[in-house]
Image (cartoon, coloured by chain):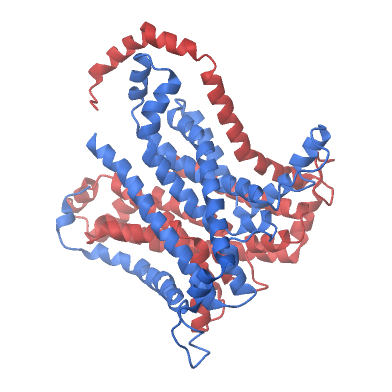
Amino acid sequence: MSTSTSHSPSFATARQATPARTAAAAWPYCRYLYLALNIAILVFLLAPIAIVVVFALNPTPFIQFPPVGVSLRWFEKFFASRDFMHALGFSLEVAVLTTLSATLLGASAALALARGNLPGTRLIVATMLSPLMLPAILTGLALFQTYVLLDVGRPTWGLVAGHTLVTLPYVARTTLAVLHNFDTRLEEAARNLGASPLRTFFEVTLPLIKPGVLAGAIFAFIVSFDQFPVSLFLVSPGNETLPVTLFNYLKFDLDGTIGAASVVSIVLAFVVVIGLDRTVGLRSYVKL
Amino acid sequence: MSSTATTRPNGLALFILPSALLFALFFFLPIGLMALMSVLTGNPVVMPKVAFTNRHYARMIGDPYYLEVIWTTIRIGLVTTLVALLIGYPLAHWMARIKSRTGHALLLMAVLAPMLTGIVVRTFAWMTLLSDKGVVNQTLMSLGLISQPLKLMYTETGIVVGLVHIYVPFMVLTLTGVIGRIDERLEQAAENLGASPLRAFLEVTLPLSLPGILAGSLLVFALAISAYVTPILLGGFQIMTLPILIYQQISANFNVGFAAALGIVLLMISLLLVIAYNRALGLVSGQRELQ
């Protein structure tokens, strides 16, 4: 394709020509159909989330629709439940530890890949991103078997290691994206002006890659907080993460407490996403 | 890309080591052990006499039940992928072509919001919608459209609906990237030459977005066949898929060897899909380089 702008005016004039007019006139409802279809799809995507909020506020002990009123009793029950509170605390603990390790490891790996002149970079990147594509349930199963074989039990660090594996790719990807985008001449300039490699790193490189690292860290936190398949195999009874506790509860009960718990985790995710949007903008990390 | 790639690794290359160690100890070693366990008669740590065997794989191939489970898993994956594509394409097209920045940001939010809501929470949402006394049945009954509740939950249809909702954002994001790279002027040129918008879409945009369709479909299929929560909760323990069977072998039967063999089968299917996915996305960037 030619990218010269001199073609644009001819396109503009061509749009006024008769064939285009007739084509558009023959499809008067095309545009409306397209919009209606897309709005229906958006409803499909978002309605279930809205429904969860409705059930969290509906006071009846069983799922009832339409809702009969508004109450906070399920939120009270959720926050009063020892099991749920313990699970929430444990989930937050695991998510924080995972975010720290995934950010540290992922960002340094990205730095090595972008600046270290490593051979086989493409293969290393593909390997590092592979936990995203391979079934997480297999990561859980394989780690579970390893811990059984090595007889280490089900320690928290084992769970954090599993979570780090599935969150590190996000940090590596966002950090690599910024590293590839920024002008390496800035680093060279700093070096030429007499800064040591260490000083160049802390005063030039680090501030520039911060948005990517931060975006990856926030994503790692959310993914770890919501992680289920790896946790399923690696948690020990009495020390479960919130998604596992919710899952076990759901197998037998379907009341508003789950709704309340869901709203709490949705609110948490949204707070984090709004934070993400404020700090780096959403567009930067959804490039696939 | 910089042209320094020809020089030798420098000090920064050492920063790869912590991640390399993590992957070696917690990814490659465990998967290797899983492969090993799948061909052993028992746990070598607790059992002194352990021999190599192919009985776990023979059991899987010999028993029609397990082949049926594998086929159910693949069938659910295929239907989920197809529906996700049909739903995801229009939305991805809109996202790629929308002019307003606010509009784009809102659409992106709408696609990401479900992604950021945990799988368990979203499955719960579908349970409240699809159960016998759920929102869909209550609404249809109060409107007098049906007298008996429709059986939506504990069916494959229910599982597919839940899985589509969970994985359609991945389809949308993959397709948006690919459609966004197709020059909009090609479509306009076709329309200026007299093609209807539908024909311009079918003969220009759709063929050019085929690699994206392929990549998105492979991604959704890979995710759908490895799903555990949604099939078990919306299937009500009545429909057996590979991941459910794997977990059952661990939790109920403690048959680690057979679970490992099932895991290796799932791993092989996924690996093939990952390679195909990368090829498909490679096709997109290849096209781009040609332009």
Residue in the foreground of this view, choosing between B56 and B182? B56
Residue nearest the viewer, comparing B107 with A95: B107
Residue A104: image location, x then y, percent = 41, 62
The residue positioned 49% from the left and 51% from the top of the image is B221
User: Where is residue A215 shown, x and y percent of the image?
Assistant: 45, 49
Left or right, residue A227 beside residue A248: left
* Residue A70 visible in the displayed image: yes
Quick check: B214 above or below B45? above
- The quarter of the rendered structure image containing the N terminus of chain A is top left
- Count the labels in the image: 0
In the displayed image of the protein, which residue is found farthest to the top?
A18
Which chain is rendered red in the image? A
Q: Residue at 40% x, 53% y: name it.
A: A213
Question: Which residue ends up furthest to the bottom in the rendered image?
Answer: B48
Can residue B105 be seen by looking at this rendering?
A: no
Residue B80 in the image, given as x and y percentages of width and height: 55, 47
What residue is shown at x 50% (from left), y 69% (from top)?
B61
The foreground one among B107 and B240 is: B240
In this rendering, would B105 be left or right of A42? left
Residue A71 position within the rendered picture, expressed as x and y whole percent measured from the top left: 82, 46
Rendering colour (chain B): blue
> Which of the two residues, A203 or A26, is positioned nearer the viewer here?
A26
Residue A164, placed above or below residue A61: below
Q: In this view, does B62 lie to the left or right of A263?
A: left
Quadrant where the C terminus of chain A sits is top left
